[in-house]
Every structure is written in structure tokens, then in C-alpha cells.
Amino acid sequence: MSAPETGMGATILGWTDRRACTITEVSKSGKRVGIVEDIATRVDENGMSDSQEYSFERGTGSPTFFTLRKNGAWVRQGESIRGQRLAIGNRDHYYDFSF
């Protein structure tokens, strides 16, 4: 797992969807990060397909905060360990058309 750094890519994980974001803040301890969702623009022509390609622009707005938990997972601040997760070090976006 990569140590978080400002400007680094990250991915908000849903059930099957993924949303690309950028880390905008890192606490001194490195155990809390602020992220802003990127603007993901689809650049392929595959329609309602699992094969999806996106270009990314850094989003604007207020950050959402995630904290590092004892089990090594990054979870949205204020939520239980089963809350929304964040993967750090990889910017990925995917929309699941089957739901």
C-alpha cells in the first residue's frame, strides 16, 4: 500500500462502481486524508460495456475525509469499519451498467 501524498490518485470503492479522486490533504500523522472527486469523461465508444476508458480532470469543491483504520482499510470519516472504502495510489473509474 502506498503512503498517501497530496496530488496522488485514489479510488472510492462502491459495490461494483468505482469513482476516481485526488488526495488534496494529508494529516501530519498520515492517517487521515481529504479527497475531491475527479471529473471523469468517458473517451471510448464502447456503449454499455465493461470495457471503459476515461480521461480525468481534478475536481473542485470541499474535500471528503477518510481515516486509516486498525485493519489497514481507509474508511470514510465518521462511518463504521464497514463504511465506504478508499483505495490509495490508483485512480480508477467504472460504471456498472448491470444495476
Image: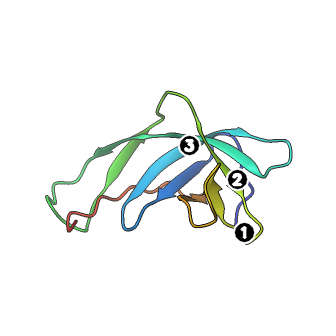
Viewer-side label of 1, 3 = 1
Query: Amino acid type of disc 2?
Result: Thr
Looking at the rendered structure, which numbered label has been put on residue 72? 1
Quadrant in which residue 90 is drawn: bottom right
Element under disc 2: strand
Q: In this view, does 71 lie to the left or right of 62?
A: right
Query: Amino acid type of disc 1?
Result: Gly
Query: Amino acid type of disc 3?
Result: Thr
Residue name at image x 55 percent, y 61 percent: 83
Residue 39: percent from left, percent from top: 39, 38
Residue underneath mark 3: 22
Residue name at image x 13 percent, y 58 percent: 47
The first of marks 1 and 3 along the sequence is 3
Viewer-side label of 3, 2 = 2
Q: Is the residue marked by circle 1 packed among few (<14), some (14-19), or many (20+) residues within 10 Å? A: few
Which residue is at the front of the view, 19 or 5?
19
Residue 67: percent from left, percent from top: 70, 53
Element under disc 1: loop
Decide: marks 1, 2 in contact (CB < 8 A)? no
Element under disc 3: strand
**Number of on-image labels:** 3
Q: In this view, does 21 lie to the left or right of 43?
A: right
Residue underneath mark 2: 67
Residue name at image x 26 percent, y 66 percent: 51
The first of marks 3 and 2 along the sequence is 3
